[in-house]
Image (cartoon, rainbow, N blue to C red):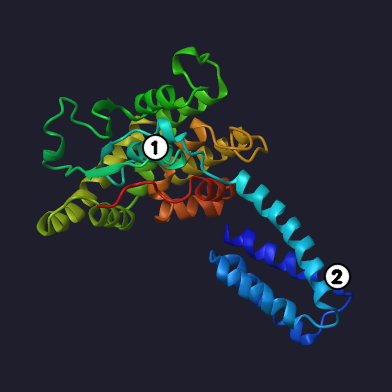
Amino acid sequence: MRRSSSIASSFLYRSIGTSHGAVSAYAISNQRLLQAALFSSSSHTHRRWFSSLLDSVAGGSARAASLGVVGAVASLAAAVSMSQDVYAKEPLRQELVPKEVVLYQYEACPFCNKVKAFLDYYDIPYKVVEVNPLSKKEIKWSDYKKVPILVVDGEQMVDSSAIIDQLSHKFLSDKDASSVPEDDEETKWRRWVDSHLVHVLSPNIYRNTSEALESFDYITSNGNFGFAEKISVKYAGAAAMYFVSKKLKKKYNITDERAALYEAAETWVDALAGRDFLGGSKPNLADLAVFGVLRPIRYLRSGKDMVEHTRIGEWYTRMESTVGDSSRLRS
């Protein structure tokens, strides 16, 4: 919300200047003080700042300045409040927050990131266990040998879409997958993510040897690997996935990887139909699903190209702002 604060500081400054009818050259320099105060969370700092401001504004009495500040602050508070309401998480009611949530994952896995987008947006604290994709020793206790696996207060959940359905039914009173019609817009686009969008990602991030190495550098840097494993996985994995991506292109009838990615991004933007989110003024489960699977590639070459060559960037930025910081618990 730093941009909102910057805009708000300029608004507050102009309001104060208007209340005096004129602003001295010295007073102009105090716009920086306004911005600094808005970014500060200390009430003591705010008190000192307002005192300095009242002393430094030229061309009016302290009483007039005070009245100008009061009016400006009231307008500012309303503006900032509205901005925060639009782009904010939706935390669960405290009594619904589970005691312990553990996600078994690969850091770069799009399906794991889909689950994390849900947990982050609803501000559900969770621990992460990074699974070694070679040994998978971290999930030997489970009969299910894929990720993500989510354990919520001792209950195991598997498969990303099924996990989100279960979490929604458990924690969101207005979400019940069993009662949602087949042609529901949100359901349609969640299925599109699983049946189409995820399948254009691998051919893009492993499109050539340099991009395959870039992807595996990210994977090994964030994954659960020993030093020797990290080196071997980076180069052997990149080479293997380069050839696998070619098979995936054939399997899903993809002739031009980037064109397929751009088309998918544009298809999603068209679905928004001018709305901030598919859910309207706030994200729904389809927004979270698309954002989740795109998050691992956003700052790779493929993700940068996607944002540069399609209209998806504004929506993605809104989602980043809205989902906000991760609710992951750090050990």
Residue occupying the point 25% across, 45% down: 241
Please say whether residue 15 is visible from this viewpoint: no
Quarter of image, res 53: bottom right
Describe residue 235's horizontal placement relative to residue 317 as left or right. Answer: left
Label 1's element? helix
| Disc 2 target residue | 19
Total labels: the figure holds 2
| Disc 1 target residue | 114
Is 242 situated above or below 102?
Answer: below
Label 2's element? helix
Residue located farthest toward the front when viewing the structure as drawn: 63
Is 245 situated above or below 145?
Answer: below
The image shows residue 42 at horizontal and vertical percentages of 53, 66
The image shows residue 213 at horizontal and vertical percentages of 27, 56
Q: Residues within 10 Å of mark 1 (few under 14, many from 20)?
A: many
Q: CA distance from mark 1 to mark 2?
A: 50 Å
Residue occupying the point 87% across, 78% down: 22
Residue located farthest toward the right when viewing the structure as drawn: 21
Residue occupying the point 62% across, 35% down: 272
The image shows residue 110 at horizontal and vertical percentages of 35, 40
Q: Amino acid at mark 2?
A: Ser
Please say whether residue 103 is visible from this viewpoint: yes
Q: Amino acid at mark 1?
A: Lys
